[in-house]
Each structure stands twice: as structure tokens, then as C-alpha cells.
Amino acid sequence: MCGIAGLIHRGKSSNVGEELQNMLQALKHRGPDSTGYALYANNDGQNFILRFKVGENVGEGSTSVNEDESVYDERKKLVDKKLSELGATIVKEDRLTPYSYRYEMKYDKDLMEFSKALESIESVEILSIGKSLELIKDLGDATAVSERYGLNKVQGTHGIGHARMATESGVDIKSAHPFWGYPFADVSVVHNGQLTNYWNNRRVLENKGMRFMSECDSELIAVFLAEKMRNGATLEEGMKESLTGLDGVFTYFVATKDSLGMAKDTMAAKPLVLYESDELVAMGSEEIAIRSILPQEIDTYDPFDGEVKVWQI
Amino acid sequence: MANLKTDTKKTKAQSMGLHSEVLTGKTQQKFFNPDEAENFFYWGTHDVDFNKRTELDVKDMDCKQANEKIDRLMSEGYGTIVIKNPQGKHSLGVGILNKLNLIFEGSLGYFGVGSIDGPIVRINGRVGWSCAENMMAGKVVIEKNAGSCFGAAIRGGDLICKGSVGARTGIDQKGGSIIVGGDAGAFTGFMMQRGRIVILGDVGINLGDSMYDGTIYVGGKIGSFGSDAVEAPMTKNDIEWLNRKLKVAEIGNNFDVSKMTKIVAGKKLWNYDALEPTEKKGAI
């Protein structure tokens, strides 16, 4: 069934890493397979943050194939070589797990060509590119993933997250949420539901040059919105088109460098509880997610069927 | 609900008088006979005193611990219980089968006060999905909003939300009244079979979709009618009933109920004439 959570502070920063961790941990019972975060951090905005993986987590419950770690080192060398060929300058690099990296880099050319070139290396997947987006996903619950990647100290304005129960695809990082809105910097999506016209849409979008990295139906939302925005639509316009363009049941969140949005299908089949004030918007699959950061008595509500909302920082 | 006991505890079915049920023909139910009340034992009920009041802080309890504590308090005779810090926890206050004043100082999560039969519940907050599911009798008042599937499959009692409710309100409703002061989402009254739904505000699309029977009253705009939901004329009885119910529900002061839209089943989706006479009599 999956659990999703999101929050946006309006006009200020906060410890969004810890807040989102608490919200997702409260939703652990909705999805124990993997947890993902898309945090919009207080970076200096000068360099791109590139997060990528060169292999899969093959821990307990994983459906991925076990590989020797030396393979990861080889792939990392290929990535560095490719970055150099593309004209990207690495400012800082961190190896967070044997299979995942965070690079700060300078780059000023086309991100789609950049992504295609980098992902032409076997088993390399870009998790996100952005100037404030820090997208982290891995197997385990919210606390385990947060501790593994040191997320509870991340300061920022907003974020979305996902606790996944794998139904449509495997237990692995590539099928975990959030999904990056390739090829747009700083765009991420999380989803709760099932999309029934995934393959029809995927074929159309791939013919238009968009890329899919997994067979997870939720990835379609990120690609669908990215394709709309590539053709000039605003985020909100793209989201409204998704209500008819996507078939199935869904509640999803999308975030950009300065906004957070939600959409709910026309059957209102998937849950969402929302708290909204002048300073903070917090939402999740269940109220207990919101209560984990706002224990005092507050007014919350369920958005109605077919509703789309977007908030700015 | 009467709280009648015998000295000997039988099996649950036997205690409820079902042991002599004869399963023949289309109408299979054998109803409870009041003349045999002294033999009736309603398992899981308690004799309580409304004047005996206590508070329970459930902040550090999970739902099972909280519900067990409520049950223990009822067994000690407490008839008025105030629950502090429910903080959106799921399944609180479920399965209460006796009279009780139950007050929640805060919001509930999913499946709050489900399968109850008799208590009067006030929730000074919001409720999540499927509040009061399968409610048999009693009264539940929610001061703020409610999630989807509000009052799913309720069979009796009054379920009142002063705010707005989500989608599929009153889905599979089999009796009782659901009264909403604000708006309601899509598929309100979906497959309802009996009872009444009152929405003072607007409702979403597919109102009363595939409803078998029962009545829906809407004060605001209607997104669209569902399959086999049709408008019916308001009668004097409707207006009197609505005025009385809104007063009981503590909402809709000075609301002109005569201007509400009344929706009933068109009864084209099923063969109403095939019902046995006793079943026809039971249908509203």
C-alpha cells in the first residue's frame, strides 16, 4: 500500500531531514521494503549535486543480484572518466555506501545528454541532479536509511518521502521512490497507488526520448510530468493533465526547488491527510505522520477527488 | 442495548439466541424474542454508571493497550471516559457494545469507534478513514473533518460530522443516519442499502452510485448523480425529520431544509419485484 509524506516550510528553513524521517517512520507499517527521501537542502546553489549508484543493495529482502564490490570501484572510475569527457568538474565527492555516491560538480551544458552519457555505463543510475535536491533511497525503514546516509542533520525548506511496499516490481533501490524528474534538475516524485496504463504511456514517452530506469509504475508520473514541463507546461498544468492522462488510483507528491504539489485521482481511492498554515504545509497518507512533527491539536482535512494543489516556499 | 446476563456463559452464538436458527427459504433470520430476554447475554458488555467519570491519557499507548484500558475502566463501572492525547492513533474506541459517554480530546486515525453498539461518543478533533464502520447503535459526533468511507456499512445510530467528509461516505450503509455539516467527496452513498445520509454542503461526483435503497439529502451542489440515483420530491415528512435530526446533530441552525435535494434509488439496477413480501416490508 505504501506511505507517502511531504512538508514545506514557507519563508524559513528547518531540520527537514529529521522531520521527514519522523513522518516516514510513523508510516513504516504501510511499507517496510524501502524508504526514500527527496530533501531540498540549504546548499549554496552554485554547484550541481549529483547522486548516483553503481550497484544495488543486496541486503536482506533484496531481489537484486549480488556483485563483488570491486565491480563498483571499476564503475566509479568509468563515471569519473565520463564526467571529465562531458566537461564536468568534480568539486567534492562522497562515497556514502559501497554502491552510492554524492558528487558536487560544476556543469553548464544539457542535462539530458549528460544523463544519457553517464547512464550508458553498465548499472550506473542517476538518482538525482539538482542544486538543492538531495535524493536518497535505499532498503530499510526511515530511521535505518536516515542513519546510513546521515539525513537527520539536513537543513532545508521542503521535502517528500516514501515508505514502500513492493507490489509491482522488485525490492531494490531502482524501484524505490522518490523518482527524479529526468531530465529536470531538482524535480522529484513519490506515489501511493497503482497505474494501469503504465505500458501504453511508457511506449509513447520513450518514443519522445524520455528515459525509464525501472519497471515501477510510479516512475511514469515523474516522466509524465517532466515531459509536460519540457514542452512548456507549468508544474500545476502538468499535474492537472495527469488526472486524465494517468489511469488507475493514485495520490502523489511532486517537489521542485521552490515548490511542493499534491494530486489525487478522480476516484479518491488513496488516502491523504493535509495540514496547512501560513508557515507550514505537512501531509501524509495517515494523520499519525503529521502528528509525529505536530503533536499539538491541529486542524487537518482530506483533499477531495481530483484535487491538485501547489505551494511555494 | 440491554445488558442482560445469565449465570451460565454459553457460546457467543448460543448466548445471542441463534442456536435455534432454521436456515430454510430466502428469509433466514430468526429475530430476538423479547420474551426470552432473561436468557439473553450480550457478550463483552458492562454495566456502567454515567456519573462515574475518569480520564485516560493514551499518549504513550498503542491502540490495543488503549482499548484494553477502556474495557477495563468500563468493567470497573466507569460510564464517562475522557481520552486525552489520541494523536491520530488508529482503531481507538472500537467494539464498545454498551452505553457509555466516551469523549476524545483530539483526533483519531483510521477505523475509530468501529463496530460500536450503544455508546455516545464525542470527538473534539478529526477522524481518519472508516470512522464508525459497522456501527449498530449510539451517537457519534465529530467536531472537525472526517476522512473517506465515513460510516461505512453502518446499521444504526446517528453519525455526525460537523466539518467535511471524504469520498465514499456511507458506502454500503444498511441503516441509521449520517449527517454532515460541510461538504462530502465522490461516491457518497455508494451501494447504500438503507438509512439516510444528510449533507448540508456540496457533494462530489457519482452521488448515490448503485444505491439499492435509502435516502440522501443534499443542501449544496451535486457533482453528478451515480448510476440509478434519481431525484425525488421532498415531502412534509422529510422536512420534519430533517429539522428534528439537525437539531439532535447540533448543526444547521436556521438551515432551510425544504430547499435540499432528495436522492433515492431508481431501482433499475436490480429486480425489486423479486423480493419476498417480508423483505419488501423491510425496505424503506
Image: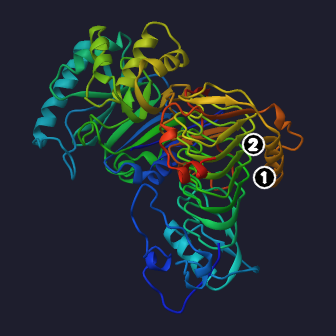
Q: Quadrant of residue A52?
A: top left
- Amino acid type at circle 1 is Ala
Respond whether the residues carrying marks 1 and 2 are from the same subunit. Answer: yes
Report helix, strand or loop for mark 1. Answer: helix
Q: Quadrant of residue A9?
A: top right
A45, above or below B161, in the image: above
The residue that label 1 is drawn on is B249
Residue lying farthest to the front in this orientation:
B277
Residue at figure coordinates x 77%, y 34% from the top left: B234
Which percent across, then down, holds residue B141? 72, 56
Q: Label 2: chain?
A: B
Q: Nearer the viewer, residue A34 or A112?
A: A34
Distance of label 1 from label 2 (alpha carbons)? 9 Å
Among the two numbered marks 1 and 2 on one chain, the one whose residue lies closer to the N terminus = 2
Which percent across, then down, holds residue A272? 53, 40
How many other residues sit within 10 Å of disc 2, few (<14), some (14-19) or many (≥20)?
Answer: many
The residue that label 2 is drawn on is B181
Q: Nearer the viewer, residue A37 or A34?
A: A34
Is residue A42 shown left or right of residue A124? right
Can the viewer see residue A5?
Answer: no
Q: Label 1: chain?
A: B
How many other residues sit within 10 Å of disc 1, few (<14), some (14-19) or many (≥20)?
Answer: many
Which percent across, then down, holds residue B53? 74, 78
Report helix, strand or loop for mark 2. Answer: loop
Dots 1 and 2: beta carbons under 8 Å? Answer: yes
Q: Quadrant of residue B140?
A: bottom right
- Amino acid type at circle 2 is Gly
Colouring convention used in this rendered image of the protein: rainbow
Q: Nearer the viewer, residue B230 or B70?
A: B230
| Quadrant occupied by the N terminus of chain B | bottom right
